[in-house]
Amino acid sequence: MATTTITPESAGPARGSARGEARGGVRRRTVRTVKVYWPVGTATLAACARGDLDVLRSDESFASLLRVLETSPELGDFGVYGDVFEVALGAEGFTVRPGARPALGSVGGRFLSSTLAVTTYVDAATDEDALSRILARLIDAHPWEIPVIELSAPLDLVTPA
């Protein structure tokens, strides 16, 4: 069995080291992920599954999310690249309870929605008030009564140095 010795130089920067510090050919930056579950039409989901990603630009619902990304420079900032996001195809299931005003379905029914999971990033050092404003813009643009938006704890994003 082979063994590997990890020296301080090969282990990379310790947690809490200077933000953006480069070592060993990599740079680590502390960010938080923002993941939004966004409904799209079944035709849009099917087109994406076939590789036609341009359909996202013409999907009316998704276009409102793109506008938030494009007008929020804090989201998806990778220096020379902006508005960076990833999209995963999926479906979301739910049961509509009394008191809801669903955009899809009716009270008492179990429904499935064609959904995209959209992940982007925000610098972990972003001021809490600014972060709250960004999240409020996402909520305001979302077509659902109760959007599903995840905000991660800080994590390191690794890029080439």
Image (cartoon, helix red, strand yellow):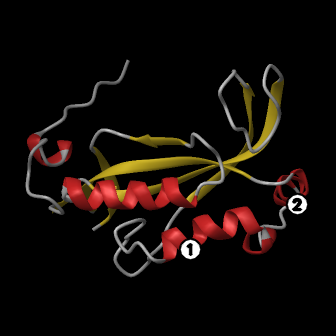
Q: Residues within 10 Å of mark 2 (few under 14, many from 20)?
A: some
The answer to which image quadrant residue 131 occupies is: bottom left
Decide if residue 24 is on the left or right side of residue 92: left
| Residue hosting label 2 | 47
Question: Between 71 and 79, which is closer to the camera in this rendering?
Answer: 71
Give the Cα distance between marks 2 and 1.
Answer: 21 Å
Decide if residue 149 is on the left or right side of residue 109: left
Q: Amino acid at mark 1?
A: Arg
Q: Position of residue 94 (x, y in %)?
A: 72, 26
Q: Residues within 10 Å of mark 1 (few under 14, many from 20)?
A: few
Q: SS class of the residue under badge 2?
A: helix
Q: SS class of the residue under badge 1?
A: helix
Give whichever of discs 2 and 1 has the lower sequence position: 2
Q: Residue at x 33, y 53 (%)?
A: 157
Question: Between 88 and 147, which is closer to the camera in this rendering?
Answer: 147
- Give the residue furthest to the bottom: 80
Q: Position of residue 85 (x, y in %)?
A: 53, 62
In this orientation, does residue 24 appear? no
Q: Position of residue 25 (x, y in %)?
A: 27, 62
Taking 95 as reference, is 124 above or below it? below
Q: Amino acid at mark 2?
A: Ala
Q: Residue at x 79, y 39 (%)?
A: 113
Q: Position of residue 114 (x, y in %)?
A: 79, 44
The answer to which image quadrant residue 103 occupies is: top right
Give the quarter of the figure containing the C terminus.
bottom left
| Residue hosting label 1 | 67
Circle 2 or circle 1, nearest the eye: 1
Taking 56 as reference, is 145 above or below it? above
In this orientation, does residue 72 appear? yes
Q: Residue at x 56, y 61 (%)?
A: 141
Question: Between 106 and 26, which is closer to the camera in this rendering?
Answer: 106
Q: Residue at x 55, y 48 (%)?
A: 36
